[in-house]
Amino acid sequence: MARVAIVTGGTRGIGEAISIALKAQGCTVVANYAGNEAKARAFTEATGIPAYCWDVGDHEATQAGCARVEAEVGPIDVVVNNAGVTRDGTLHKMSFEDWNDVMRINLGGCFNMAKAAFPGMRERGWGRIINIGSVNGQSGQYGQVNYAAAKSGIHGFTKALAQEGAKFGVTVNAIAPGYIDTDMVAAVPASVLEKIIAKIPVGRLGHADEIARGAAFLASEEAGFITGSTVSINGGQHMY
Ligand code: CAA
């Protein structure tokens, strides 16, 4: 039977590429999205992958959403926690709301999804949880105390849950992407982005497919001995 995989924020950007890569690898894929209906519809039409709408930062909505996926598609074997937002600004200008939104969605979303899917994986003796962190969670980034803290938190969350899942056949790993050519990075002011790209040894932004290859590998049967690991895919920007 094909493994059931869910990708949060799975209809756009890096998440879209991961959804497509997991389907190509033979998984039955479900994409979650938060609210961009038009893009979700276009994604489903293009890929045949169903899209389910809920906010992963909302604990109850996530439990209900995953229960619906399990009833309609099957028990969840693979979770890719990709959904994330930025609310960039220097600390002295950052509102509590901008702090809280990023912590609630980017880090809280990982907890909420794991709460829904991990117990079943544990009972069935097989699972893959892949959390999308960030180079900026490893190195810090001017104007991102919220995002860097949440992404750094994801790396700690990964290592702790990996220890709990190991004896049940559940691996938990992270990917730390660098700057990838998505809408999120396109929102960085051009003059700032130019300086960032100048510091990437490979000399360019990454492509979403280059992150998806890593996620598909970590989701595979063959990756069963890799757990608690962070795979950095950043063009050499931060050698961690
Ligand atoms: N280090 C030191 N100083 C810096 C700096 C840096 N990296 N960046 C900016 N500054 C300085 C500026 O030179 C400027 O100094 P002066 O006042 O002396 O001239 C001062 O800080 C103010 O900078 P800005 O004009 O940029 O301030 P702002 O309030 O208009 O904007 C900001 C601040 C919103 C944080 C803006 O700098 C920005 O958008 N930065 C990019 C943040 C970023 O990289 N986000 C990544 C988004 S993509 C992502 O997160 C995906 C992923 O995982 C990689």
Image (cartoon, grey):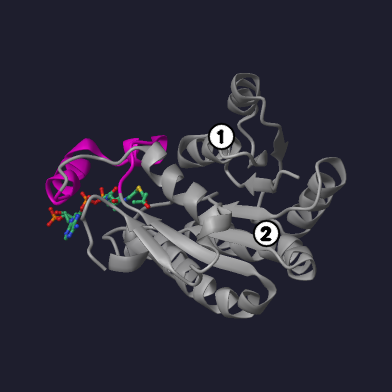
Q: Could you say which is closer to the camera, residue 134 or residue 174?
A: 174
Is there any visible trace of residue 101 in the rendered image? no
Above or below 12: residue 165 = below
Going by the image, does 80 lie left or right of 154? right
The quadrant holding residue 191 is top left
Q: Residue at x 56, y 53 (%)?
A: 219
Q: Residue at x 48, y 36 (%)?
A: 17
Instruction: Please state which amino acid type lies under the numbered disc 2.
Output: Met
**Is residue 161 a member of the stretch shown in magenta?**
no
Q: Residue furthest front?
A: 222
In the picture of the structure, the residue carrying the numbered disc 1 is 24
Disc 2 within 8 angstroms of ligand 1 (CB): no
In the picture of the structure, the residue carrying the numbered disc 2 is 113
User: At which x and y percent is residue 97?
Assistant: 53, 58
Going by the image, does 30 lie left or right of 203? right
Q: Which range of residues does the magenta coloring cover?
A: 179-201
User: At which x and y percent is residue 73?
Assistant: 81, 41
Is there any visible trace of residue 178 in the rendered image? yes
User: At which x and y percent is residue 42?
Assistant: 60, 21
Instruction: Please state which amino acid type lies under the numbered disc 1.
Output: Ala
Q: Could you say which is closer to the camera, residue 91 or residue 107?
A: 107
Separation of residues labelled 1 and 2 (CA atoms): 23 Å
